[in-house]
Amino acid sequence: MKKILALTDFSEDAMHALEYACNFANNFNAQEIVVLNTYEIIPLYDTGETAALSISLQQAEELESQRKIELEKLLGSVKPKLDQGIKISSHLSNTNLVDAVNDVCLSHNIDLVVMGIKVKDELEQVLLGSHVHRAIEKIERPVLVVPANADITIPDKVILVTNFYESHNKTALERLKLYLRKLNAPVVIMHKLVKAEKRTEIEKLAVELVEHLKEFNPQLHIINNEQQLAENVNQLAQNQNASLVISLHKKRGFFSRIFHKSTSKYLAWHSRVPLLVLHFE
């Protein structure tokens, strides 16, 4: 986790996520934080007059200038929060959020993307009007989603939410182990049974995963109740005093179940626990 990308729209929630990222950087010997702000201006072609396009371009230039100033102010306020030797820089992009994030991740060799959650009525809303689900589907680096009310702390216990099938993927396991070693925190493995699953089969897979993760002395919780998954995650996090939830994400995989509309609002808006999503093919 040498280089961290933090997304901002200059809101309080974005600032909270950035402060979380700074604390993360200080404790894991990061080298740099890059702060990204994105915007999109669509030129006005509909009148067919050059004046309309000229006005639009002028507005775009003014917006870009204003945001550059805001980014410089933001960096000035955040830099004192970083340990000596950690660099902080900014990037402004006139494109959509996902494309901008992936471009910066590639050009700056980013290891982790940090984003905050805005409190809104609609489900799955995140910075810059995008959706949590779409962002995580398309962003090509691990993503840390920080709720607005999450404590700024280093995780001292981690909950791994898994369906066991995806967590037996070799690539996913190695990436998971890499992060768990860096976090150096106890691990609680959680799985919620669904109607189509046989408990005996799930327990067999669970034992195999526990063996794979034995260096972390994991606890195992297989849950079978009528509560929604998000409620189970929050309750377990509270009971275990866990400060981070990890999900292994394959496209159209288990993560989609976690952020189903019936569960995402409770998990995202009411949990004090950030969510780390690790991707694999």
Image (cartoon, rainbow, N blue to C red):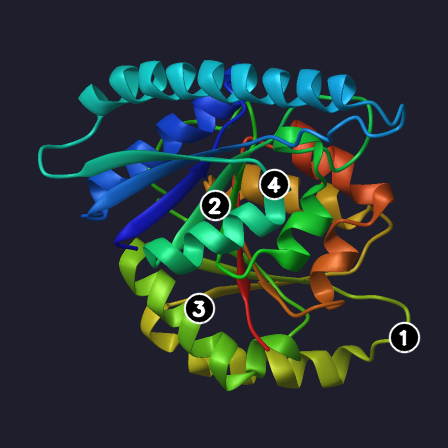
143 left or right, relative to 1: right
Up-down relation of residue 190 to residue 36 (above or below): below
The span from disc 1 to disc 3 (Cα, nearest Å) is 27 Å
Up-down relation of residue 213 to residue 53 (above or below): below
User: Which structural element holds mark 3?
Assistant: helix
Residue at horizontal 25%, vertical 34%? 88
Q: Are marks 3 and 4 in contact (CB under 8 Å)?
A: no
- Residue in the foreground of this view, choosing between 195 and 145: 145
Count neighbours of disc 1 (C-alpha within 10 A) and say few if under 14, some if 14 to 19, many if 20 or more.
Answer: few
- Residue in the foreground of this view, choosing between 249 and 187: 249
The span from disc 3 to disc 2 (Cα, nearest Å) is 13 Å
Up-down relation of residue 63 to residue 188 (above or below): above
Q: Are marks 1 and 4 in contact (CB under 8 Å)?
A: no
Residue at horizontal 43%, vertical 27%? 151
- Residue in the foreground of this view, choosing between 55 and 178: 55
Q: In this orientation, does residue 219 appear?
A: yes
Q: Which residue is mark 4?
A: 95
Q: Are marks 1 and 3 in contact (CB under 8 Å)?
A: no
Q: Are marks 1 and 2 in contact (CB under 8 Å)?
A: no
Counting residues from the N terminus, which is met first, the one under dot 1 or under dot 3? Answer: 3
Q: Which mark is residue 176?
A: 3
Count neighbours of disc 4 (C-alpha within 10 A) and say few if under 14, some if 14 to 19, many if 20 or more.
Answer: some
The span from disc 1 to disc 2 (Cα, nearest Å) is 28 Å
